[in-house]
Amino acid sequence: MTKATDSTSQTLAALGVASADAVTARFAALRAEFDGDAGGEGAWKALHDSWMGRKSGVLTRVTENWLKTATPALRPAVGKCLNELRGHVEQRLAELQRAAESAADEAALARERVDLSLPGVTRPLGSRHLLRQTFAEIERIFLSLGFAVVEGPEIETPYYNFEALNIPEHHPARDTMDTFYLETPRQNSGGPARLLRTHTSPMQIHTMEKQPAPVRIIVPGKVYRRDNPDATHSYMFHQVEGLAVDTDITFCEFKGTVEYFVREFLGPKIRTRLRPSYFPFTEPSVEVDASCFVCGGSGCRLCKSSGWIELFGAGMVDPAVYGFVNYDAKRLSGYAFGLGVDRLSQLKYGIEDMQLFFQNDVRFLRQFP
Ligand code: PHE
């Protein structure tokens, strides 16, 4: 079957076209063929080349073979029809190009689409251990009061753990703090004995040796004692030591600071009470009690019907301690405290067995995200 476009390689004369109507018919046939080709999807580029190609496209051939060779009588009809056909072809090809391009865009988008509803890679997040959270809370409170946080070694000499804290060698106070002594090469060659510190108080001495007053520090850390594990004891536990030394620190400041800490830590309704106690490195020494936060003071199982709960030991720094660090006991005064972090955490979060802190059971840990 011959195509209408085949006729464009011949002149109108050769085709025997002699009237304007015949010209119109020829162009109608071209347009019909174009529309037929343009109906198919895609391939607009090939269509563009075969119809609009500069050298041998259909429109070029019509221009060369039909228009330029047309008799003066037919020329206007050929020119008009050619313009119409060109307009039609151009418009349709532009449409096809747009369609082809947007189809390509959509295909690319579909290919590259990120499905935000997919579950993704889940990385299980741990949480901070409850004791760490308690440390952080205690540190936050004392930092807000102008204390600095310092840390010290868990291995100490008897001098820092005992003597310089006014606990001489045969003093009965040592009995309550029996501990683990280490066999170290240094000690074997005549150096001082080494032990695991029984409290964070040695850092009082280290700090005052290193810097002159004023001192306001807290010392979070691990301590060790030869205790058998039970619901309130462990051979390893945690303390936060506190020490404030300055030229005009009174018992009032001590009491105010302790009360402020307890209220911040346990809640604004909590009252505190100081009970006389004894530590070799503080004078006077006290135990700080809080009104029972379960019964509010009326008496319950937690406070053993007393209305009070024992929190921690504290006191005004014993002047004898200043003697060990060359502080002027006449000019300076201060206070110290030793918070038992495990115990405070047990009280605050209602944890009956201290061993839960150390067993790493995720069923326990997950309750404190
Ligand atoms: N170091 C003492 C203890 O572990 C606690 C304490 C610290 C008491 C500071 C008074 C002052 O028992």
Image (cartoon, grey):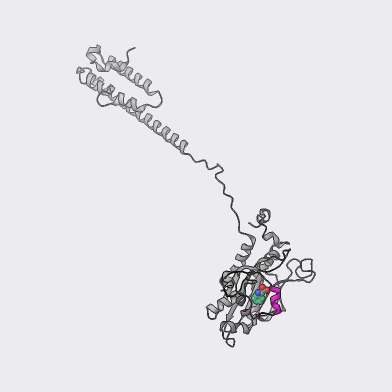
Q: Nearer the viewer, residue 132 or 163?
A: 163
Q: Which residue appears at 67% of the width and 60% of the height?
A: 357
Residue 279 covered by magenta stretch: no
- Please provide the residue range marked out in magenta: 164-177
- Answer with the quarter of the image where residue 286 lies: bottom right
Horizontal arrangement in the rendering, residue 105 relative to residue 236 (left or right): left
Q: Residue 147: x percent and y percent?
A: 57, 73
Quadrant location, the N terminus: top left
Q: How many marks?
A: 0
Quadrant placement of the C terminus: bottom right
Query: Does residue 272 show up?
Result: no
**For the point 56% across and 79% down, which residue is it?**
208
Q: To which quarter of the image does residue 247 belong?
A: bottom right
Q: Nearer the viewer, residue 338 or 52?
A: 338
Does any portion of residue 178 appear in the rendered image?
A: yes
Residue 57 image-quadrant placement: top left
Residue 103 percent location from the top left of the image = 42, 32
Q: Position of residue 233 (x, y in %)?
A: 71, 66
